[in-house]
């Protein structure tokens, strides 16, 4: 049984088709990335998963529990960290987490609350009023609220947007631990290096539709390949010009070229062609493609 099963989900806001038939199965224990440009439908999809919005068509189930028909059980299985900083200014951090526990019917939850606060470096702020916290500290509390009932599925919607490096490292260390312990994690982020480092599998959305879905390694390998960056004393041979990734590098007087290669075996023929043309290699770097390259290629390729 999938941790999250999304089947043909559609959502329209007046004339805007936010989601156009999205289908995904996120397996138990996965660290799954949901990526896309602004307006792609990521937050709309998360709102539907969380039960905050109803789909016009299609279904979403958390561990087999439909988020509309069996919303109580589905909600217990889910912890969501929203983009927005939403907090009650009249309570301390500990009071906020105790109340959140109460929403899920949990009594005597202080041991886990203490552990969550410790792992998110909130212990010294336990008795501080929420309105006195910095933006980064408030975001830590949002993460703690999502985890306070030990949900098997955790959804993080831009959790590190606008926060410092320390929080990112603290958060990812704790979330990675929870994932190793069996929790399913779904992440949306504009920091693609985070997604590449953390996510086992990734779906990319554009205009409310899934335009790519694969393992992170397979996406990088299949879509983008590697790049050989060479600085030359001499002219780039004509037979290598079709390999140039950036056409503006072919202007007269340029001596640095980025050449597409799909395998290490292609490097030697390129060097042979340069030697035969009398071009001297002054500098050379073989760069592995990353998720940002993949993202740009897919988004530019999907119309």
Image (cartoon, grey):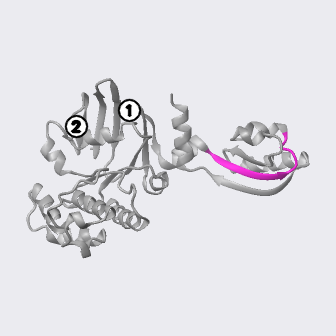
Chief SS of the magenta region = strand
Q: Residue at x 30, y 68 (%)?
A: 120
User: Local crowd at mark 1 within 10 Å, few (<14), some, or many (≥20)?
Assistant: many
Part of the protein shown in magenta? 225-237
Q: Position of residue 123 (x, y in %)?
A: 25, 74
Residue sitting nearer the eye, 110 or 65 = 110
State how far apart marks 1 and 2 are (Cα).
Answer: 15 Å
Q: Which quarter of the image is occupied by the N terminus? A: top left
Q: Is residue 161 magenta?
A: no
Residue 208: give its label: 1
Quickly name the residue at label 2. 53
Which residue extends farthest bottom?
124
User: Local crowd at mark 2 within 10 Å, few (<14), some, or many (≥20)?
Assistant: some
Which residue extends farthest top?
15
Pointers 1 and 2 in contact (C-beta within 8 Å):
no
Q: Quadrant of residue 107?
A: bottom left
In the displayed structure image, the side of residue 30 where residue 54 appears, left or right: left
**SS at badge 2:** loop
Q: Quadrant of residue 170?
A: bottom left
Residue sitting nearer the eye, 25 or 176 = 176
Residue sitting nearer the eye, 215 or 158 = 158
Q: Residue at x 31, y 65 (%)?
A: 134
Placement of 69 over or under 17, stated as above or below: below
**SS at badge 1:** loop
Placement of 219 over or under 14, stated as above or below: below
Q: Position of residue 122 (x, y in %)?
A: 27, 71
Q: Position of residue 293 (x, y in %)?
A: 57, 45
Residue sitting nearer the eye, 129 or 109 = 129
Which residue extends farthest front?
132
Q: Position of residue 257 (x, y in %)?
A: 75, 47
């Amino acid at each position: 049984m999938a941790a999250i099963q999304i089947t043909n989900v559609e959502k329209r806001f007046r004339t805007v088709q936010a989601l156009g038939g999205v289908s995904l199965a996120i397996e138990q224990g996965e660290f799954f990335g949901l990526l896309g440009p602004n307006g792609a439908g990521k937050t709309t999809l998360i709102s539907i998963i969380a039960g905050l919005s109803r789909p016009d068509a299609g279904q979403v189930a958390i561990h087999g529990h439909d988020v509309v028909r069996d919303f109580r059980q589905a909600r217990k299985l889910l912890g969501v960290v929203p983009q927005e900083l939403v907090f009650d200014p009249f309570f301390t951090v500990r009071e906020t987490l105790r109340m959140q526990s109460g929403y899920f019917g949990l009594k005597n939850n202080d041991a886990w609350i203490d552990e969550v606060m410790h792992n998110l470096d909130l212990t010294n702020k336990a008795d501080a009023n929420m309105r006195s916290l910095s933006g980064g500290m408030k975001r830590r509390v949002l993460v703690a609220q999502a985890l306070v009932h030990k949900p098997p599925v955790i959804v993080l919607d831009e959790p590190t947007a606008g926060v410092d490096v320390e929080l990112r490292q603290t958060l990812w260390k704790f979330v990675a631990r929870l994932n190793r312990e069996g929790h399913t994690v779904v992440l949306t982020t504009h920091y693609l290096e985070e997604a590449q480092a953390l996510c086992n599998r990734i779906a990319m959305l554009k205009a409310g539709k899934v335009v790519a879905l694969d393992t992170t390694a397979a996406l990088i390998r299949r879509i983008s390949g590697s790049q050989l960056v060479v600085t030359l004393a001499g002219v780039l041979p004509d037979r290598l010009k079709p390999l140039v990734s950036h056409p503006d590098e072919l202007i007269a007087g340029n001596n640095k070229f980025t050449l597409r290669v799909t395998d290490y075996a292609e490097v030697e023929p390129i060097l042979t062609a340069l030697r035969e043309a009398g071009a001297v290699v002054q500098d050379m770097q073989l760069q592995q493609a990353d998720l940002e390259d993949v993202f740009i290629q897919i988004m530019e390729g999907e119309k």
